[in-house]
Amino acid sequence: MPEDLASLLTLVAAEIGDNSFAHNVGNWPDVPGVFYAYDIAKRVIVLADRGRGVKATLQQVRPNLTTDVDALTVAFTEIVSGRNPEKRGNGLKVVRNVVESKEIGLLFRSGIGLVNIPTGPGLMHIKMTDGNIRGTYAVILF
Amino acid sequence: MQTIQLKKFGSVLVSRPAGLEAFNAIRPQLNPDEAIQIDFDEVLTVTPSWLDEFLTQLTNYNEGKVDLLPTNNASVLAALPVLGEARKDFVAATVLRAIQRRKDSE
């Protein structure tokens, strides 16, 4: 694997996994921690948590957020953090920029919202899906 | 001029708490009156969270006298534009100087 791809894949997985801890510490609804698995041969990384999810986290600073789709849109496009007033909230914006511009794909679900960025360079699409994800679920393809 | 080699903290630098811990560990060796430069050599990945936290602490400590040495590290190059636009403070100024130097050298 080229070093640049390894560097960026690590960034994407680490930022998503770290968010699970940073935004749920002290607030895990039931099972704490993150599921993490990868298969280099299949070129896939999976992360999941049973935390509060993106909407509940961001509603702390944006109480008017009512849907998972809106919450995911804010999370991936605006520099805002559920840990206000800390100056943070850059991570998922960098993740989006990296995945949109490189040979990395991302499927990210929280609640009934779904973020999809194709594996080839391509733009992010966010939509509502069937089935609810408690917490977050991310599949990184490369 | 003081130089901080980030490889001393590991080759994969992840999470804000780890960035804060790295700053706290190296602070006793730093003179706040002297400029600091940061060397990314031999580091595989720096996440935006780690870099933001480390730079925030460092630039507050010496009032912005921090510069980033030129690097081709893909994770650093990906994080810098977002950190540069995130806010107007010492971190943004440090990052924007690094971005401008890279543009000038191209």
Image (cartoon, coloured by chain):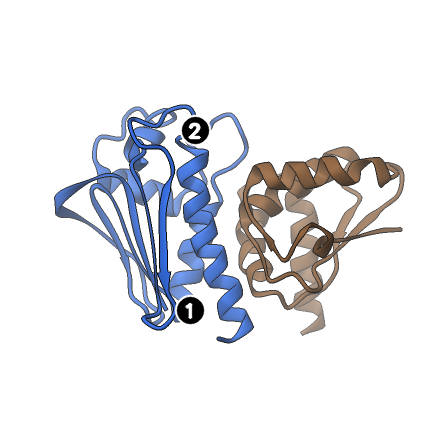
Chain colours: A blue, B brown
Q: Residues within 10 Å of mark 1 (few under 14, many from 20)?
A: some
Of B68 and B86, nearer the camera is B68
Residue shown at 60% from the left, 62% from the top: B44
Which label's residue is closer to the chain start, 2 or 1?
A: 2
**Rendered image quadrant of residue B20:** top right
| Relative to A7, A98 lies left or right | left
Residue B89 in view in this figure: no
SS at badge 1: loop
On the image, numbered disc 1 is attached to which residue? A102
Vertical placement of residue B93 versus A125, above or below: above
**Image location of residue B38, percent across then percent down:** 75, 53
Residue shown at 89% from the left, 37% from the top: B33
Q: Which chain letter goes with mark 1?
A: A
Tell me the amino acid under the disc marked 2.
Val
On the image, numbered disc 2 is attached to which residue? A25
Residue shown at 37% from the left, 60% from the top: A38
Residue positioned most to the left: A130
**Image location of residue B27, percent across then percent down:** 79, 37
